[in-house]
Structure formats: C-alpha cells, structure tokens
C-alpha cells in the first residue's frame, strides 16, 4: 500500500474518531498526517477576506484535533485554508502535499429518502489522485 502521507479534512463534527483513525493508520505506515480546515468564502467576497469569527472557530477545532492526536501519541500538522469550495481545495491540497490517502468523514442524511454525502465528498471521490477512505459515524 505504501502510505507515507495522509490528509484529513476536518470541520469539527465527529473529529475524535476520525483523527484517532488517521493516527492509528499513520502509526502502522509511519506516515505523516496533515489535518486541514477549509473556510469556504462566499463568492461575493474577496477570497482573502478577513473572516475572523470563522477563523477563530477553525483554529479551536484544529487545536482540539492536534490535542486528540497527541493523546494517541501521534503528532499531526494542521493548516487553515480559505477557498470558494471545499472539495476542489481538498484535492488541490492533496496534490500539493503529495498525499497517498485522504481520510474524510460524512454524515448520514437522507433528504427525500436518498443518502446525501455532500458536495465536497462527492468531488473528492471523483477527482482525488490518491486513495480515499470515507468514514461515517454509526446512525444514531
């Protein structure tokens, strides 16, 4: 399998299990883990707009994710990005960092009876140049 770099896009929901899973896999492969939070900036604003309240929330989430990794005995590298859409940004980050695996989570929502995994997950599954592992929490 040869996994040396793992990318974990995060949004703060269900991160405990996701970060622990990434660290567990990384330990086995002696891989580096990158955790990234992407702030989606509305199209009517400049891409480099100051989005302080969302940035503060993102920094709290990334700090918490790093703490979760520390609890597992693993160190992760965190990054905060701003983009128009999360999906293409995740793929671009995977290419830039040369990752071998993207691990991302999805919720289980059934609007109008169909499972909806979200635009970002759909885009990554379609466009990622590497393996993608999709994690879903149990349905409550």
Image: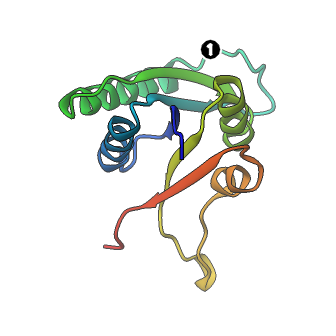
Task: Examine the rendered structure and indicate whether residue 118 appears above or below residue 18.
Answer: below
- Graded by Cα atoms within 10 Å as few (under 14), some (14 to 19) or many (20 or more), the crowding at tag 1 reads few
Residue at x 30%, y 29% (from the top left corner): 64
Q: Nearer the viewer, residue 31 or 64?
A: 31
Q: Residue 137: x percent and y percent?
A: 37, 63
Seen from this angle, which residue lies furthest bottom? 113
Q: Which structural element holds mark 1?
A: loop
Quadrant of residue 30 within the rendered picture:
top left
Q: Nearer the viewer, residue 118 or 3?
A: 3
Residue at x 59%, y 30% (from the top left corner): 39
Q: Residue 70: x percent and y percent?
A: 23, 26
Left or right of 126? Residue 118 is left
Q: How is the image coloured?
A: rainbow
Q: Nearer the viewer, residue 12 or 135?
A: 135
Quadrant of image for the C terminus: bottom left
The count of marks equals 1
Left or right of 140? Residue 71 is left
Residue at x 44%, y 20% (from the top left corner): 77
Residue at x 21%, y 34% (from the top left corner): 72
Q: Which residue is mark 1?
A: 50
Q: Residue 51: x percent and y percent?
A: 58, 20
Q: Residue 126: x percent and y percent?
A: 75, 56
Left or right of 134? Residue 98 is right
């Amino acid at each position: 399998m040869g996994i040396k770099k793992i990318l974990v896009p995060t949004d703060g929901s269900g991160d405990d299990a996701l970060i622990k899973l990434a660290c567990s896999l990384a330990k086995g492969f002696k891989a580096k883990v990158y955790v990234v939070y992407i702030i989606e900036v509305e199209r009517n604003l400049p891409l480099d707009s100051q989005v302080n309240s969302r940035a503060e929330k993102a920094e709290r989430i990334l700090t918490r994710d790093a703490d979760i990794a520390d609890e597992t005995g693993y160190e992760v590298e965190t990054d905060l990005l701003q983009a128009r859409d999360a999906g293409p940004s995740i793929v671009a980050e995977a290419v830039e960092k040369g990752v071998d695996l993207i691990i991302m989570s999805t919720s289980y929502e059934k609007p109008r009876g169909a499972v909806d995994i979200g635009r970002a997950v759909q885009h990554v599954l379609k466009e990622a140049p590497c393996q993608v592992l999709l994690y879903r929490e149990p349905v409550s």
